[in-house]
Amino acid sequence: MKLNKTYLLVFFAFMSVPVGSLGQVTDTLTVATAVGDTLVEQTDARKRSVLRRVADYFFNADRHAGKKFDFGVLPGPHYSSTVGLGLGVVATGLYSLDRADTLLPKSNVTLYGDITTKGFLMMGVKGNNIFRHDRYRLDYRLYMYTFPTKFWGIGFENGKKDDNETDYRRIKLDAMARFMFRVASNTYLGPVINYQYVQARDVEEKGKHLFRGEDLRIHAQTIGFNLTYDSRDFMLNAYRGWFLQLEQTFTPRFLGNDYCFSTTDLTVSTYRKLWRGGVLAGEWHSRFNYGNPAWCLMSEAGSNSRMRGYYEGRYRDKNIMELQVELRQHVWKRNGIAVWAGAAQVFPEFETLRWQRTLPNFGIGYRWEFKKRINVRLDYGFTRDGGSFLFNINEAF
């Protein structure tokens, strides 16, 4: 049983009054009540102080861009059809390895964690480290997650059949590092390594045949090279410039892989200011696999950055081509909106491309500037199978 602090003070005040001194009780009560009121006022003040600090943190988070390491933490609820209702925490940091060089792009690092009502549990880190004079760049990511998900099989025809929906638990670990040397203005070339571990557990009996008898536990060791051209003014939220990235990787048998294949991944993005506060962004992405990729290493439609709103991996095959165009508009103070449209095709070979197999995508989103040019985004993406909300930080591309 909890006692009010004022009552406790009154009790101890009575106990401290000497026998025969009851005439002092009124004065003692006055003092005790005053002390109790002071404690209540102090508690309320502390509450107001905490609330003010929280408010100041969010509304003034972009006022310290000159710090050596500009760091911020943002918790937020989110929902998507893939993982359900969840609470994520994203911590983002901006820094420079040469603060005297005002033309050097900012390096960045993002740490994130997430837990949802559908049993999704994830944690990870990713970033882009830009060295002095922009001679070298290091891109990296490391994340792991586990959650109950669904599988529809390989190919467009399997993906569109609702009856193919198969429940299973997916466990994944992904580690990637890309080190690049500047070989020309805005142009970088270098090696890339990637390790992936994927396991499917508790596969629903009715859908086991959709895995085509392949292993449900996959290790993939990948090496390759990357060629990048990047003239964006700010990589996390570009207003102008181009980004072209060609990555060629190999997953060969001599590295211990059971499923051997190579992959060509191409991304072309462009950004242009249209009017005050308005930016038009466009992106083309394609990923082609040659050889024998495992079921979990194929090209997939649906993510936080492309074909937003699709259940990730419902449509998968050896190859994918996808296009999106987005209009971003600043509205008022730290608020903005975005609208986009896109399309994709997943396919095994080029001769199987059909217009009627195109996956449409469009949506609308709200933007809130957490830090200078770092936006929190809440998107709703429409798909051929419905739609869903997505919550994330930084622009989709």
Image: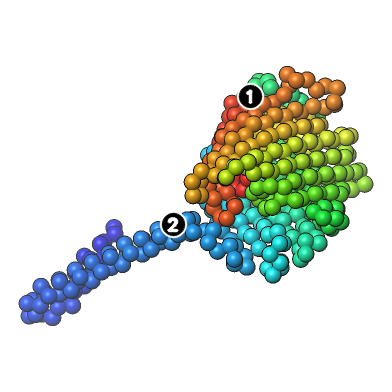
**Label 2 Cα neighbours within 10 Å, binned few <14 / some 14-19 / many ≥20:** few
Residue 160 point in image, percent of width and height: 69, 22
Residue 186 point in image, percent of width and height: 80, 54
Instruction: Identify which residue, 383 or 79, lies in the foreground.
Output: 383
Residue 16 point in image, percent of width and height: 18, 77
Instruction: Identify which residue, 44 or 27, lies in the foreground.
Output: 44
Residue type indicated by callout 1: Arg
Horizontal relation, residue 123 to residue 31: left or right: right
Horizontal relation, residue 138 to residue 303: left or right: right
Q: Quadrant of residue 197?
A: top right
**Quadrant location, the C terminus:** top right
Q: In whole angstroms, how far apart are the C-alphas of marks 1 and 2?
A: 40 Å
Residue type indicated by callout 2: Ala
Residue 208 in sight in this render: no
Residue 256 point in image, percent of width and height: 88, 46
Residue 263 in sight in this render: yes
Instruction: Identify which residue, 376 or 18, lies in the foreground.
Output: 376
In the displayed structure, 103 sits above or below 317; it is below
Residue designated by label 2: 55
- Residue 16's label in the rendered image is none
Q: Element under label 2?
A: helix
Residue designated by label 1: 384
In the displayed structure, 276 sits above or below 344; it is below
Give the mark count: 2
The residue at the far right in this view is 254
Instruction: Identify which residue, 256 or 316, lies in the foreground.
Output: 316
Q: Element under label 1?
A: loop
In the displayed structure, 248 sits above or below 55; it is above
Q: Residue at x 15, y 71 (%)?
A: 29
Q: Earlier in the sequence, mark 1 or mark 2?
A: 2
**Quadrant location, the N terminus:** bottom left
Q: Residue at x 85, y 39 (%)?
A: 263
